Image (cartoon, grey):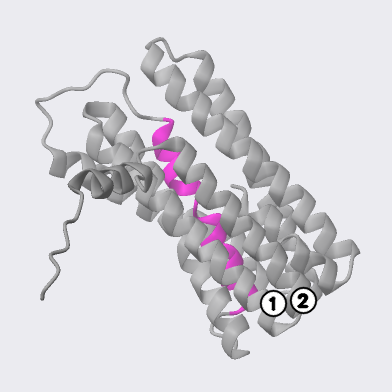
Amino acid sequence: MDTAVHLDPRHGSRLREFANLRQPWFVGLLFVLLLATQALGFLVLGTGLAGCGLSESIIVLDNLLAIACAWIAFRRAQGTIALFWFLFTVVLMVLLIPTVIQTYDTLFDQTVLSNSAQNLLYALYGAPILMMLFLSETHRRARVKSEIFLDFFQVAIVVGLVYSTFFFLPAQRMLPADALLHDISLSDVQSLLLLIAVLVRLQFARVPSTRNLFLRLALFLIVCAVATFVGDWIYLHYSSSVSAWFDLGWAVP
């Protein structure tokens, strides 16, 4: 005799409500679990290729999780706030590209890009942040979205050329050790200047919603600056095994 199986629709509904990226506590729980997996991976696998490969793969997952959350915020917002979250999504996607390349290099013990090229890609996350600083606090519906994105694209080209001039081209004429110090120094300076720029822009924000967004951006940049300064200092003064453990710090931003 067949036994009928009755599925409680309320159970599925509760499960979907629990596993929802719109719930901040659920996203926080996912992040803590990923961070704990990173630490456990180092304890079990060590800081060699296997441990570092797992850790960097988890950082990629962290980045994808952040992109998903930022995209949800973009879809729910309108006007200038939507543009802000769109640009923040671009920031995370820019950071994702070199992270994926570095993870691939670690997992397969290869070198796809030089250190200078990877550092340039990481540094480009500042370009969308600079665009955020020039967002208007009032949304003009008369402007077509395609025109706005075209403006952003033109600014991105200019900023990309500037970044190439300061990061990539000078390093090509330096010895590897000097190029590394050059890239690290500029990366630290960029983190500090971006934070100062956002704090200055915050002083001129009059709309409460805009101030709230720039406060969040300032918090993000503070975490990035601390991670960059501490991570670079550890990289220069300690062994590779200690630097590998700081992957947990790179995951925080």
Gap in Å between the C-alphas at discs 1 and 2?
A: 5 Å
Q: Where is residue 49 in the image (x, y as percent from the top left)?
A: 69, 84
Up the image or down, 151 lies above or below 49; here it is above
> Is 131 inside the magenta-drawn segment?
yes
> Can residue 192 be seen by looking at this rendering?
yes
Provide the residue designation for mark 1: 51
Range of residues picked out in magenta: 114-133
Instruction: Give the residue type at disc 2.
Output: Thr
Where's residue 123, x and y in %?
56, 56
Which residue is at a point 85% across and 64% down the rendered structure image? 236
Q: What residue type is labelled 1?
A: Gly
Position above or below: 54 against 59? below
Numbered disc 2: secondary structure: loop
* 164 or 5: nearer the viewer: 5
Residue 57: x, y in percent? 55, 71
Residue at mark 2: 47
